[in-house]
Image (cartoon, rainbow, N blue to C red):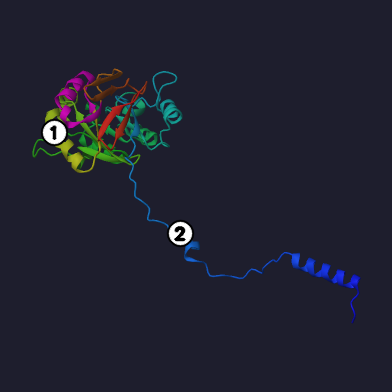
Amino acid sequence: MRLTKTTLVLLIAVLLLSACKPFTPTPSPLSPSPSALPPTPLPATATTLPPSPTSFTFLYTSDEHGWMSGQENGQGAAELLGLWQAEYGLGQDPAVLLLSGGDNWTGPAISTWFDGEGMVEVMNRMGYAASAVGNHEFDFGLAVLQTRLEQAEFPFISANLRWKADGSVPVDLGIQPYTILDVAGRKVGITGLSATYTPEVANPAYLVDLEFTSYQSALREVVPQMRTDGAEMILLIAHICPDELELLAIQVAELGIAMMGGGHCHIPYARRSGETAIIASPPELGGYAYATLAYDPSSGQTSEEA
């Protein structure tokens, strides 16, 4: 075929256009190069942060004397429980603990007529964690006391109440020298004291086989045991007047007792003696006392919060 000049020009144009068309390669799977592989994660470096302090609130009553319904409007078990639940989250917040300084019964007929049975039922429902042993706990005799303590869902504690025969704490009656509770992940040890003059303010016929030893010696015996058993913070609940506790706190300062709760004298009280917070409440469920303490596990120290 003979090409004319015009045909030749067109052919050259087509060839030029084809040469200018961009080339798009078809992708094909390639084995990734070592540099393209995902990086191997490095082992995590363990970082241990110091545990933060734990804040506790300890609610406290004493000398309830069976006044579950209170003596005036706005007082009594139901009113206090409602207040504690609303203000402090009692029963919901694991760092809130309710304690008593003893003399739970003997007062109005609703308590006394039934040997304190109704009052223990009420205190069970309120969520008490422990009670000291006061002089009025003995009002109905040791057999009734043992029955009440079996009924209670919380321990009754006295480190200085002993059988004369062998010097042992009367655990057979249900009384314990101390208890250790898991509170918000910390071990809180609670011990108790009964007034050494209890035989003078209770029926002595019920106490002939019992004795009340020195506060200092009892605490120096049991607090080290509590530490050995894992207690991180030590509390004392005592049926002892606050002025006696002020002196006692100084005498046993080396034991590191964070809080002492008093009773028997029927007076509200909130002070510090050395490094120990001391509280006491109004009687007959007419009020309460409280202390807010922070425990620092890194130092083992307890401080009072505002």
Q: Is residue 249 magenta?
A: yes
Q: Is residue 281 above or below residue 46?
A: above
Q: Quadrant of residue 224?
A: top left
Question: Could you say whether the residue bearing mark 1 is in a helix, strand or loop?
Answer: helix
- 39 or 28, which lies in front? 28
Which region of the structure is painted magenta?
238-260
Residue under label 1:
220
- 245 or 102, which lies in front? 245
Residue under label 2:
39
Q: Residue at x 18, y 36 (%)?
A: 223
In the visual, does 255 lie left or right of 96? left
Q: Residue at x 17, y 40 (%)?
A: 225
**How many numbered marks, from 0 up?**
2
Q: Quadrant of residue 199?
A: top left
In the visual, does 147 lie left or right of 8? left
Q: Say which quadrant the N terminus sits in.
A: bottom right
- Name the spot of residue 296 as percent of width and height, x first: 29, 34
Q: Is residue 12 above or below residue 73?
A: below
- Name the spot of residue 274 as percent of width and height, x first: 21, 22
Look at label 1 and name its amino acid: Arg
Per the model, the C-alpha gap separating discs 1 and 2 is 61 Å
Q: From this viewpoint, which residue is outermost toward the front? A: 5
Q: Say which quadrant the C terminus sits in.
A: top left
Residue neighbourhood size for the residue with mark 2, other residues' Cα within 10 Å, grouped as few (<14), some (14–19), many (≥20): few
- Name the spot of residue 46 as percent of width and height, x first: 34, 49
Q: From this viewpoint, which residue is outermost toward the left? A: 165
